[in-house]
Image (cartoon, rainbow, N blue to C red):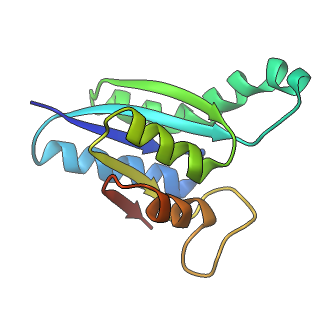
Amino acid sequence: MSIKVLLAVDGSETSDRATDRLIALQRSGAPFEVTVIQVQPFMSIEAQAMHLQSYGEASMKSACARLDAASIHYQTHIAMGPAGVRISEFAEAGGFELVVLGTKGLGWVNTVLMGSVAKAVIELCSVPVVLVR
């Protein structure tokens, strides 16, 4: 039986480290059923049509390449809105058993020890969360 894992990424080095940690965890135990999620901020209808999919895919490229290299099957999902809220909602609605993400991403709004997205996910999500520095 596999564990449903949601890997939240934004293309940052911290996302890469979170991906690497997930790969290490998978190698040491039960197989994972992985979904990679990337959340875009709200944007106009025109901007959505032009950029949402392409930027989301670009932000997931490194994580997907790492998972491919480790022969870990995954799905992808791109959402729009406040990242912490969307990650938490998706994790709970999808029946995920674990969320993995980096403590700081590419966003300019970061607290001293932990990014605002990571903080929101641990506050909002009832699913266990692994934070990677």
Question: Going by the image, does 31 lie left or right of 105?
Answer: left
Q: Residue furthest bottom?
A: 112
Residue beneath the point at 21% across and 50% down: 25
As rendered, which of 96 and 93 lies closer to the eye?
A: 93
Q: Nearer the viewer, residue 26 or 86?
A: 86
Query: Which residue in the rendered view is the most extreme toward the top?
Result: 49
Picture coordinates of residue 129 (x, y %)? Answer: 35, 58
Q: Residue at x 62, y 27 (%)?
A: 57
Q: Which quarter of the rendering shows the C terminus?
A: bottom left
Name the spot of residue 67 as percent of width and height, x first: 36, 33
| Callout count | 0
Which residue is found at the position 55% from the left and 62% from the top? 120
Q: Quadrant of residue 68?
A: top left
Q: Which quarter of the rendered picture does the N terminus lie within?
A: top left
**Residue toward you, 66 or 101:** 101
Percent from the top left, x then y, of residue 108?
Answer: 75, 63
Q: Position of residue 99 (x, y in %)?
A: 37, 49
